[in-house]
Amino acid sequence: MTNPAPTTGPLVVALVYDGLCTFEFGIVTEIFGLSRPEMGPGWYRFATCAVDEGPMRAHGGLTVTADGGIDRLDEADIIVVPGWRGVDMPVPDGLLRRLRAAHARGARLVSLCSGAFVLAATGLLDKGVATTHWRYADALRRKHPGLVVDEASLYRSHDGIFTAAGSAAGIDLLIEMIRHDFGPAAANSVARRLVMPAHRSGGQAQFLERPVALREGAEIAPVLDAIRGDLAREWTIAEMARLCRMSDRTFQRRFCDATGMAPGEWLVTERVTLAKQLLRRGTARMEEIAIAAGFGSAHSLRHHFRRKLGISPTEFRARFIAENLEPTAA
């Protein structure tokens, strides 16, 4: 097999450490380390650096070695921390010093999932905002009280430091970085190769802890089907409970047990989903979409859309149209 032609773009360096999070590391190598000749010679360069000495263990029984030592960070344009070996595991002082120095000279620092604990330990995120996997949010908040932890978002940025939530959110963040560096066409090309959506806003909510599919024939299922079939209708708790032949209190308790959400929040989520579908068609006015989705007014649609996704309906539509106008890679 022939070696790919060398590239000259930004140097991405991924940390390798004992206890390496294999999946997060795989995300980084797939996006930045894979040969992509269609992107031209200006595409990213990629290297790995060892935090620890000797062969290092990775999840899944693998043993890994890196391209070089921690001094590789001194030349990096982008440094990625693919998780960390434990939320209570200390970060080596030498690594922290090099990360601070890299940030001072303008390198971008990126963390996936629990890697936020490494970047937070530098002190560079104090008085800033970061995200991590929702399972680790409280621990990150306790360890770094000067940091605002936004566990509701897929990814966040602060002063050249980028943090992503769970593993799949790491893909979203890295694709967004490609969009910033090389434009929508490049981001769309990488996303298609990964069979991923071309864009998910960083403000989009992480998945709930209990996104449980209802059992067929469950007590709540009929009312969910009825609501989805007529989202424009003005639904009340009393009406939903009546359809299930329950008291209001019993209905709300069983609804939360089944879906992980209160009825009102679930209804808003479904309406936003319908609004997204209507916006993708690119023709209806905002007032028409708001009425069809059950929000009643464009103002209400904008409020709930931004609360759920972090962007306005107009921006969502513009991004979708722009992405679909991009030429498909050969």
Image (spheres, rainbow, N blue to C red):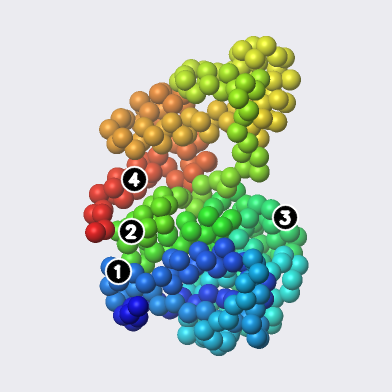
- Which quarter of the figure is the C terminus placed in? bottom left
Q: Nearer the viewer, mark 2 or mark 3?
A: 2
Q: Alpha carbon of mark 2 to alpha carbon of mark 4: how far?
A: 15 Å
Check if mark 2's residue and mark 3's residue have beta carbons within 8 Å. Answer: no
Give, as a three-letter code, the residue at label 2. Ser
Above or below: residue 63 compared with residue 259:
below
Q: Residues within 10 Å of mark 2 (few under 14, many from 20)?
A: many
Q: Position of residue 48 (x, y in %)?
A: 52, 79
Q: Earlier in the sequence, mark 4 or mark 3?
A: 3
Q: CA distance from mark 1 to mark 3?
A: 40 Å
Residue at the spot 48% in from the left edge and 59% down from the top edge: 171
Instruction: Tell me residue 44's x, y (percent).
Output: 38, 74
Q: Which residue type carries mark 3? A: Asp
Please tell me whether residue 187 is drawn above or below residue 232 in the rendered image: below
Q: Which residue is denoted by mark 1 in the rendering?
A: 39
SS label for mark 2: helix
Q: Secondary structure at mark 1?
A: helix
Q: Is residue 329 visible?
A: yes
Write down the residue under mark 2: 189
Name the amino acid, label 4. Answer: Phe
Q: Residue at x 53, y 71 (%)?
A: 80
- Say few, some or many: other residues with alpha carbon within 10 Å of mark 3 (under 14 / 14 to 19 / 20 or more): some
Of the numbered discs 4 and 1, the one sitting upstream in the chain is 1
What residue is disc 4 on? 320
**Which mark sits nearer the N-terminus, 2 or 4?**
2
Q: Between tags 2 and 4, which lies in front?
A: 2
